[in-house]
Each structure stands twice: as C-alpha cells, then as structure tokens.
Amino acid sequence: MTLTSIIFAGILTYLTRMTMIALISRDMLGDKIKAVLEYVPSAVFPAIIFPGIFINDFGTFIEMNDPKIFGALVAVIVGYFSKNIIATISAGLVSYWFLIFIVFN
Amino acid sequence: MLTKKQLFTRGMLDISPHMLSVIPFGIICGAIGVELGFQPYLVYAMSFIIFGGASQIVFLQVLSGGATSLVAVASVGIINSRHLLYGAVLSEYLEKLSFIKKLFISYLVVDQGFAESNKFFKKNRSEEFLHYHLIGTGCTMWVCWQIATLSGIVLGSFVPEELGLKFAIPLTFIAIVVQDLKKLDHVIVMITCGLSSLLFFDAPFKSYIIISPIIALFVAALLLRLKK
C-alpha cells in the first residue's frame, strides 16, 4: 500500500522534472519569460534558506538571538568574499557550534 | 571544446562541495524514516523512486501523522513542483538532445545540480556536449544520496543530533546564491521569496515552496519592466 503511494509520488516527481525539459520546446517561451527565468535561482532557493534558518523543527519562529541567525550571517559574509562553497558551509556550521557548545553552554 | 568526459568530471567537481551538507542530511533522512516505523526497504525505495531530498521526509511524516496517502502524494508533488522552473531554465541548453536522452536526464535534475550546472551553462554556452555537465552533477548527487540514506537506514542516526546538521542545508543554498547579492534586483527577488516563504509557511501541503517563488518571479517581471 505504502509502496504504491511511493510509486505515485515518484511518478509525480519525475513529471515535474521531465515536463519542461522534454515536452516544452524553447520557442514556446517568449523573450519576456526567458528574461524572468534568469531569476529562478534567486526566486526559489530563499524559500529553502529562510525557513531553514528562522523556523524550528516544531514549525514555529525562532527567537531573534538564535545561534542559527548568527551562523547564517557568518556564512553569507564568508561566502561573499571567499566564493568557496566548503568555506561557506563550514564557517556557518562552526560559528553555529561555537555558540551552542561554548557560549550558550 | 571540452570532451564529454571532461564535462562530466567538471560537473562532478562542481557539485561535490555540496556533499558536505547532502550526506549528513541523507543519513538523517534515512534514520528518521526508520524511526517513524516504516519498513527499511520502503524508506530506501523512496531514495530510488522519488529521489527528492526533503520531500521524502515530508511524505513519511504526513503518512505517520495519520493523513491519507493521497495527501502524502500531493505534498510530494507540490514540494517538487519547483523542478518545473528548473526545467524551464535548463530546456534552452538541452534543446538539441533526443527525446530519450531528455527523458533520462530529467531523472537526474536536483536543486544543487541545477544551480551548479546552470552557472556553468551560462558561462560556456558554446560547448557541444553541455548536458554531460548536468549528468555529472546529477550522478554524483544520485550516488551520494543513495549511499547516505542507505547508511542512515542501516546504521540509524549515527550523526549526533546535537550537532544540528540539518542547518547545513540552508547553508548550502546560501553558498549558491550569495554571489548574486551583488545585484540589487536579485537581492529584492531573494528577499521577496524569503519573506513570502515565512509568511506562507503554514499554507497546506507545504505549498510555500512554490507560492513564494511565483511571487518572487512576479516581482522580477516588474523589476524588468522598470529597468526599461
């Protein structure tokens, strides 16, 4: 039973991936739409970033002094100047750990 | 002109730093599935059949919360609908491929792979075998995701929960968009999306994940009109 639902969820997910790549030809999208599509990364990824920082596991907003906010700011600054993915992730995690294990402990 | 193999390798290299967050997250996903009481083979089947990160956890959480399987399937579909936007962007570069190749490549489109391959595509439009870059990012992600979720299923959550490694996921996406903070129009679009996602976080079926990009793209369209 659960397996059937997983298969349906898988087909649905595959369709979201395949539809625009395989079924839509590029000429069907006008120049204006193409220009807007340039913004897709900036328009999609903050919807993963913001809740990942500001909303906790129980679905409620975090306090304004939450270590995640500090960790995210450090990651933004390090990422902006280093242009390095590993440095960005590590800086965010280490500063977050520094606060939860040393400062707030 | 780069060879297919060079492009594939380049794709692997471009996405591999993200494995720093993807692997711990995969382990956590696998472990949570088993903790929620689902049979291990079903938890793993999702990594193969859905291959969709957070949507896999949501699927199991919705089911174990007592909702019908229709609700669980719908949630996965809505969370993953953002791939439609990725596909629309990528289609420009994949246009010349045969239908069969398009069908195969589609399975491998994931967030980080789309982000890194799209960056590469924009700078290397003239390459003939560009799609090998996307296959490189997608295959790397696929292999790591299978191994990570499988380890979480078999070994349990051996990643200590106190480390809060789920936080690595927003950090990975910060690394992807951070250079666009140089452009004011992109900053406005990002803030619109981020604030909308918090505002609509409680909307049914986790639909904030597609509602906020749509709002942000409308704002982007307005900005383009103002620029002219």
Image (spheres, rainbow, N blue to C red):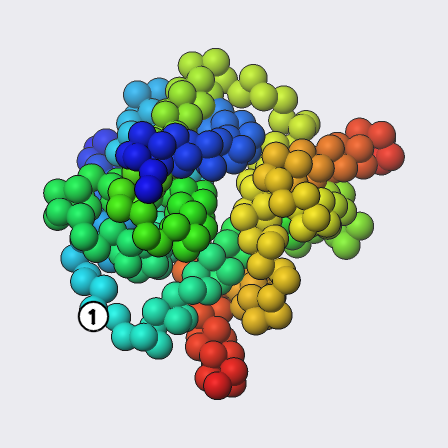
Residue at the extreme top of the image, as rendered = B155
Q: Residue at x 47, y 79 (%)?
A: B224
Judge whether residue B203 can be spotted in this image.
no
Q: Residue at x 60, y 66 (%)?
A: B183
Name the amino acid type tagged 1: Met
Which subunit holds the residue at mark 1? A
Residue A19: x and y, percent?
A: 21, 55
B113 or A81, nearer to the observer: A81
Vertical comparison of B7 with A33: above or below: above
Residue at the extreme left of the image, as rendered = B99
Judge whether residue B181 can be spotted in this image.
yes
B198 or B84, nearer to the observer: B84
Residue B176: x and y, percent?
A: 54, 48
B16 or B204, nearer to the observer: B16
Please state, as top left, top right, bottom left or bottom right, where the N terminus of chain A lies in the image: top left
Vertical comparison of B43 with B220: above or below: above
Q: How many numbered circles are shown?
A: 1
Q: Residue at x 18, y 48 (%)?
A: B97
Please state, as top left, top right, bottom left or bottom right, where the C terminus of chain A lies in the image: top right
Residue at the extreme front of the image, as rendered = B1
Vertical comparison of A67 with B194: above or below: above
Residue B190 occupies quadrant: bottom right
B56 or B8, nearer to the observer: B8
Q: Secondary structure at mark 1?
A: helix
Residue B80: x and y, percent?
A: 35, 50
Q: Which residue is mark 1?
A: A28
**Other residues around mark 1 within 10 Å, as few (<14) / some (14–19) / many (≥20):** few
Q: Residue at x 45, y 45 (%)?
A: B116
Residue B36: x and y, percent?
A: 44, 29
